[in-house]
Amino acid sequence: MNIRKVPGWAFVVAGIAALAGCAAPPPAPVAPPPQIAIPPRPTPPMGSATNLTTPPVNALGVRETVNLGLTQAQTTWNLRSALNVAALNCLDPQYAPILTNYGQFLDLHEKSLRAANKELDAQFRERHGKTFIPARETYQTQVYNYFALPPTLPAFCDQAMIVSQEAAAIPAGELDMFAMTALPRIDSVFLEFFNDYDRYRREVAMWDAQYNPATPVIALPPSTVQASAPDAGTTLAEPGFTLQDGT
């Protein structure tokens, strides 16, 4: 019987081949993590600042602005204040009639405005005693601040244009009744802005929690939005118009 002698290296090659056949297959390539589309961070409405605070909403769901819970005299006077601010700040050419309308408004309703001003003095004197004048001036500055809020200027001027035309045309003696419906129409501009701004704050808080959790959440105390306005006690009046006895 012939026995062939197998070289030693053949066994080595065969062993390597056997081991190679038992080796685990290489791992599959790891897929890259899915790309998450991050939406842009919400921005404040009407190009406003990111750190404004809005008037609070009370338990009845009513926003506590300077136009809440007014007497008849204060309603009439706040309407005058709104038109005064519009005459000074709505300076684009399309709003030029506001100044003319405001002058006619002052002339036509001089008696009603004088009566409202006198009544307000009595009301503030009753509440504040000898300090009623500074108290009224402080409140009046808050009213001017309110109507002078810069982000709302375009919408405010649009509404003031309509109201000023109507105010200059209603018969004398009907101003108080007119003010009861006209002031809320002007105020709606600001209430809508405050609602939009509160919605922005909620949306930006949700965005930060989801996409930037390291961002600190700062709880701002509720207060009236601040805007540039005249110093306390300043009477706003346009060139060519003289306001006597506060009118």
Image: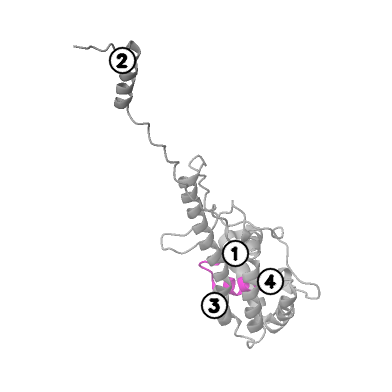
Displayed quadrant of residue 76: bottom right
Residue at 33% across / 24% down in the picture? 20
192 lies above or below 130 = below
- Residue at the spot of label 2: 11
For the residues labelled 2 and 1, say whether their Cβ atoms are less than 8 Å apart. no
Q: Is residue 84 magenta?
A: yes
Distance of label 2 from label 1 (alpha carbons): 113 Å
Residue at 66% across / 83% down in the picture? 165
Quadrant occupied by the N terminus:
top left
Residue type indicated by callout 4 = Ala
Taking the image as drawn, is residue 36 in sight?
Answer: yes
Label 4 SS: helix
Q: Where residue 86 is drawn, which disc sits there? A: 4
Nearest to the eye among marks 1 and 4: give it.
4
For the residues labelled 2 and 4, say whether their Cβ atoms are less than 8 Å apart. no
Nearest to the eye among marks 2 and 4: give it.
2
Indicate which disc, 2 or 1, sits on the residue closer to the N terminus. 2
Nearest to the eye among marks 3 and 4: give it.
4
Distance of label 3 from label 4 (alpha carbons): 19 Å
In the image, the segment drawn in magenta is 67-85
